[in-house]
Image (tube, helix red, strand yellow):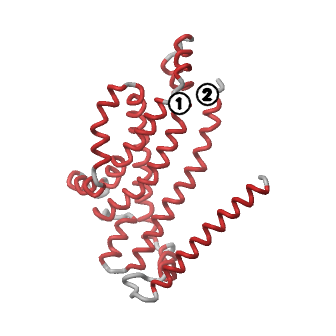
Amino acid sequence: MSSSTGIAKLKRTAAVLLSSAALLGLWWAGSLFVSDVILPPPGAVLRDFIQFLSRPGFYQALGATVRRGVESFFITLLIGTAVGIPAGSFSSVELFFRPLLAVIKATPVLSVILLAFIWFQSGTVPVFAAVLMAFPVVVQNVMTGVREIDRELLEMAEVYRFSRRQKFLHITLPAITPFFLSGARSALGLTWKVVVAAEVLTVPRHGIGSAMQFAQINLDTSRLLAWTLAAVLLSAASEILFDLVSPLLQPFRRKRHGH
């Protein structure tokens, strides 16, 4: 790593730390003028969060939310890709799904959650709502990737009589991979937000959202913010993990392009 790159990285880190310190300072200053019910100090929230770490109930709630989020995420990727590839390849398929995608994009998340609560059990609602809301994101990105395929490569495949499997592995898959990853990253962030929101409204037995709801009912703002911190850290950890795993597809892409 060059010295200029290291300095730039150091500056970015310093800027983030400075911004975080300023926000915490404003939070602490604001808490001095209002009651803890309105805005508890950062120290109280951190204390509650640390206390969570020693309680089995915290890990039950965390595990339930993680399970729902991971389940939603992979279902979304599977269905979104299965629809996005043919929709990007054939205009008739894209036209067929266009009204559904438009309706989903325009529908408020709360409406989806409340309707799903009528149809399903509380533990299923977060999964259904997250899949439905993230579905258009994955479909749109995969469609774009398919449409970006080099037509000359497709013509070459016809000349050399590639099978459908060979076309998919050597042409389609390498082309859609960057778009798929972009859609997956966006869907991941949206998934956690919808899952937690659905847990808040439907209050399943275990879940971060359920714990947030109970804290709100008891006017325990400090604990509510501590659970919010847990949700934020969970989302951040999942994005870091995604960034660590996604480069594993890069050698695959290069291999396919260079085949």
Q: Give coordinates of residue 68: x percent, y percent.
A: 39, 54
Q: Position of residue 39 (x, y in %)?
A: 41, 81
Q: Which residue is mark 1?
A: 173
Residue 94: which disc?
Answer: none
Residue ranking furthest to the right: 3
Q: Position of residue 67 (x, y in %)?
A: 42, 54
SS class, disc 1: helix
Q: Residue at x 59, y 47 (%)?
A: 245
The relative height of residue 118 versus residue 102 in the rendered view (above or below) is below
Is residue 235 shown left or right of residue 96?
right
At label 1, the amino acid type is Leu
The residue that appears at 36% across and 51% down in the rendered structure is 130
Residue in the picture at 27% in, 37% down? 99
- The structure residue drawn at horizontal position 38% and vertical position 33%, both measured from the top left corner, is 83
Residue type, numbered disc 2 = Arg
Residue in the foreground of this view, choosing between 243 and 175: 175
Query: Which image quadrant: the C terminus?
Result: top right
